[in-house]
Image (spheres, rainbow, N blue to C red):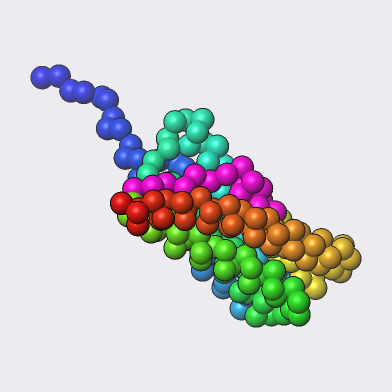
Amino acid sequence: MSSSNSSRPISPAWNLPNQLTYARIALVPVLVATFFISGDIGRWIAVGIFVVASVTDFVDGYIARAWQQQSSLGAMLDPIADKLLVAAALLLLAADETIAGISLFAAVIILSREILVSGLREYLAQLQVSVPVTQLAKWKTALQMTAISFLLCGPEGRELFWFTSEVGITALWLAALLTLYTGYDYFRAGMRHVIAADGK
């Protein structure tokens, strides 16, 4: 009686890129919890968690392409994980007034764009139309992650490097400007499909 030593292929749902995406989603409530830790340690843990989560965003995409492990599930969850992470961080920073005054408009622009694009993607999915992520949108995400990383350092970061807040706010506004441009680009491309569908 012969036995086979071949292992079953791993389900696409559990390949490494998707596992990294699951981990990024799981880190969101952990990030929120760090803001309830008293003392400087909470902020530094928050920075560490956010940086690790941000790195997984770039690593999972690279691995998926390099190892040819792209999947429909990954394509759906990856942008959702990014939006959850960014939205949670921005809300926390606004709540503790790290982002305050006119800079709140930058955060509102970023969040509004994410909601608009998510709604547009959901509608276009019903039309079986996909809107690919552009290279500029990837740069926008990288700039957002950079801005939030600096801002999460908070007062504790300014004690080490006085410029952390200034760099964070500047990067946040730059990300907001890119957000407006890429959001309009997505909206214009999506509306062409919507108008074409209504004309049928």
Q: In which quarter of the image is residue 13?
A: top left
Is-magenta flag for residue 112? no
Q: In this view, does 78 lie above or below 38?
A: above
Q: In which quarter of the image is residue 199?
A: bottom left
Residue that extends furthest to the right in the rendered view of this protein: 162
Q: Is the magenta stretch mostly helix, strand or loop?
A: helix
Left or right: 77 as drawn, with respect to 58: left
> What residue sits 58% from the left and 68% below the top?
111
> What residue sits 44% from the left and 31% below the top?
68
Left or right: 14 as drawn, with respect to 189: left
> What residue sits 53% from the left and 41% below the top?
61
> What residue sits 39% from the left and 51% below the top?
196
Is residue 177 in view from this perspective? Answer: yes
Is residue 24 in view from this perspective? Answer: no
Residue that extends furthest to the top in the rendered view of this protein: 2
User: For the magenta stretch, what is the residue range?
Assistant: 128-145
Q: In this view, does 32 lie above or below 128?
A: below
Is-magenta flag for residue 142? yes
Q: Nearer the viewer, residue 131 or 80?
A: 131
Which corner quadrant holds the N terminus? Answer: top left
Left or right: 27 as drawn, with respect to 51: left
Q: Which of 155 and 65 is in front in this view?
A: 65
- Give x and y (percent) for residue 6: 27, 25
Q: Which of 140 and 161 is in front in this view?
A: 140
- Give x and y (percent) for residue 44: 71, 65
- Give x and y (percent) for residue 30: 54, 67
Q: Is residue 111 above or below residue 81?
A: below
Q: Is residue 145 above or below residue 154?
A: above
- Give x and y (percent) for residue 164: 82, 63
